[in-house]
Amino acid sequence: MICDGNTVRSVMLSSAQMSSFRHKQSLHPSERFSDLSRVIHLLEDPISSSLTERHIFILKKMVKRCQRGFLLRDLADVFKIINICAEKVTEHPHYAKILCDLLQICSLPFLKEKSSDEKNYASVVTDCLSQMGYLMRVPVPEVRHQICSSIIAFYCHEKAKAGSDGVCPTRAEYRGQMVERSGLAETLVMSLALMEKQLSIKLRLLQTLQIMSRTSEVNCTVMLKAQAAQKICFHMSERDPSGQILFRSSEILWNLLENACREEVTAQLSNMNCIMSLKEAFLQQLVSGSSHYDQQLRNDLLVLTSLIAANQNAPFIESGFVKHLSLLVTFPELKSHNPLVRNLKLSFNHEDFEMKKLLLNVIVVLSKDLPALQSFKESRVMLALMLLIKPRSCGVQSSRRSWTSSQQEELQLQALATLSTLAPLMRDDYMTCQANTCLLLLLDWCLQEDSFSGRGHSFHGTSGHGGKKAQMRYCMRVLRCVASLSDELLNQDLCDQGAIGQLVGVLRWFTAGQNTDDAVCLEIQIDTMFILSVLCVGDTHRKELFGSDGVDLLLQYLSLDSAMLFSGLGHNKLLLATIDCVWSCVVGCFSTEDVFVERHGVHLLLQLLQSSSRPIFGVLMGTLLELCENPQSIVHVLKWCGERDVTAPQLLLQLWRREEDETAVKRDQWGVITDVKHPIVSQHQYASSSSHAVSDVSENMRANIYCMFCKLGFEQLSGLNAEDDITLHIIHRYLDFKVCEVWAEVSSDLCDEGVTLISSDDEALKNIRQMSEDTAEHVCSIQQNILQRKQHDELQQERHMYTEISLTHKQRELAAASWRNYVARTSNYSILKEFQRLQEEWSTSGPDEALEEPLKQESPQNP
């Protein structure tokens, strides 16, 4: 072979480089930095760039000498060599093997000579790791596979030991941080598009992404920037004999949902392609999956479906997924000729049980999208729920395989929870399936004493262990949701089925039982009260059905110990529900009102008004006002006497003063009006929005108190003192003040809007304003007279007290004088003789003068 001078020089240079390389083989790693620059020069030099065999030989030597890993200081040169090799692979496949060897060394932790190297070379490391991800462009399967393997090993490599030469591997935490900063995860996601026809490489790449997203929020966030959720879900249903694509894809989606922004993940998955891919994967696992692993994967896909369904923009209806899901919900309770379920068989194992629960949960989530209800109707979902909630004792025993008793109980409770969401949305199906009858039968079964014993292991079975309280709780919840719709047809159907008497029986069962003060029992009683209130309000006949038995139960609940209101279990809510039930089920029906009043129900309400806190004052006052339409109630109100002998008028006046204190109405220390222009306006009204004069009526109880006194009267009220009389005169004129206040507000609003009044209207408003001030001055003068009378009475009482004190002192002086006389008579015989003489003169002179004379004579001798 004939070679020119350049070729000879290149060969000679290469021989010299090889000799130097062999000489450096046994040197310390810190003494090998110049070798890499020579390798780079050999690879890049135009003279030696075509010497492939030389390149391979030198690179193999380099690989052999770096088996422990690459130094942080060498990384820039190492990856420059790797990139040169990657560029040459396309034309010279021989470089692929050496490139894989170099990448395999990259799977080892990078080496540091000093502790500060990690910080000093951090930017170099992130740049090199980023370049590693871009090497996925190399169209060689072995290289791509090695890249994925190296990343996995590098990211998961356990703590390595330091070498004897002082070179230490980098920390695992440091490597993880560098991977996160490099954006390697985003690059790998983008490279998925290059793996369409390389199944094994694609599986390895998915495994890499699965590991990188398992615990790192940063990696998950970076992956989402590359639309990872959408890209992975789109390909998850592709054909794969091993089934690993579906498994890896679902795991990555789970990691993204747990470690990244869930809303962003679901938004990426909420498109037609992803939903179709998810549907195909789920149906494939449902039909062909038989192993425990396949069933678990099927359930995982169903959970992903429920999470995506929370996004109402997801096209579940357009993709036909809703139709399949609603059909599966009814299986195996309902038979169908649909090909999907006709040949479908369940083994009724734990995974099938979990799938059934997940399906019930999915339709609850999908029900937020109203068009999905049509699919539920076509698949007879409501009927399937009715069959699930049916008590076991009412069902026909079958010899075929079915759910266990504990599974049936849990499905029964979840079906009830599902029904509480669907029933208000599917009223026609609810009525068609006679759901009210089924629920009342279930409620009756809950009250029966039998051998059933709830396990209470499920989420919905809280507090249901050993009984049926969990079933009763969710049954009441469904009835409450239905009753709250205020649909007269549904409510009438409930009443026709005897719901009122049955609900009264529920309350009787709780009042007669023991250990019924836990949160679940209180919730059931509150829901029962609410349902009774909704059914009976405004209907006299239903109130008569409530009857005296119901009134007796309400009186028991009204007698609740006030200390229990602060227990935190919900007794305060129960009390509110009871008062509301009195208002709805008792007031307005003469028969129930009379029973309530005769059995001292009014006294209990007043007692609660005195002892309870402000939040329930409104409903208490409203109930009392309605009851006072009955003349017997007024008599009981006036007869009532509470703690510290407080009468009902006194209590109402105290509440009025408390309201004025809290709303900062201007009053002096005696409660007298101080602002005649605004006699009842609070300080808070000045800063409130428009129409404050009207809104003030509903924001505090002064209007209710005024109405109560209109029922009771403003005169001949017992037990009132001067302060009460002062307050009573303000209440007496409350309506006049309020009317004038409203007109003043109208005038102010017209002025603010720039409206000019005609003379007659302006004069009328001035007269109203003047009338208000005159009324306020008149009330103020009456209050001053009351104060003067009070002061006069107090002065008379003071004088009377002083007179009594003077008389008391006088009596004491006389008693002392009498004692001294007695002592003198018994101790001095001359004085005794003198007293005998004076006794004869008592007929002509007073006895006091006769007694004092001998005392004056003998006092020096008897000190």
Image: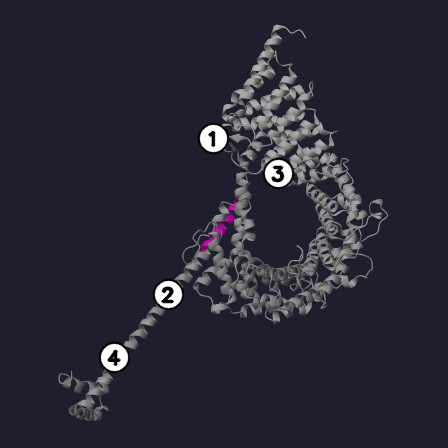
In the image, what residue type sits under mark 3?
Cys
- Within 10 Å of the Cα at label 1, are there few (<14), some (14-19), or many (20+) other Cα atoms? few
- Within 10 Å of the Cα at label 4, are there few (<14), some (14-19), or many (20+) other Cα atoms? few
- Separation (CA) of disc 3 from disc 2: 78 Å
Mark earlier in primary sequence (1, 4): 1
Q: Are marks 1 and 4 in contact (CB under 8 Å)?
A: no
In the image, what residue type sits under mark 4?
Glu
The residue at which mark 3 appears reads as: 261
The residue at which mark 1 appears reads as: 114
- Separation (CA) of disc 1 from disc 4: 109 Å
Front in this rendered view, residue 325 or 56: 56
Asked which quadrant contains residue 276, the reply is top right
The residue at which mark 4 appears reads as: 813
What segment is highlighted magenta in the picture?
762-777
- The structure residue drawn at horizontal position 59% and vertical position 66%, both measured from the top left corner, is 558
The residue at which mark 2 appears reads as: 792
In the current view of this chain or complex, which residue is farthest to the left?
A: 860
Tell me the mark number nearer the camera, choosing from 3 and 2: 3
- Separation (CA) of disc 4 from disc 2: 32 Å
- The structure residue drawn at horizontal position 80% and vertical position 44%, both measured from the top left corner, is 287
Picture coordinates of residue 230, whole percent (x, y): 69, 34
Q: Secondary structure at mark 3?
A: loop
Tell me the mark number nearer the camera, choosing from 1 and 2: 1
3, above or below 277, in the image: above
Front in this rendered view, residue 449 or 93: 93
Q: Is residue 529 visible?
A: yes
Q: Is residue 426 left or right of residue 137?
A: right
- The structure residue drawn at horizontal position 67% and vertical position 67%, both measured from the top left corner, is 509
Picture coordinates of residue 581, whole percent (x, y): 64, 62
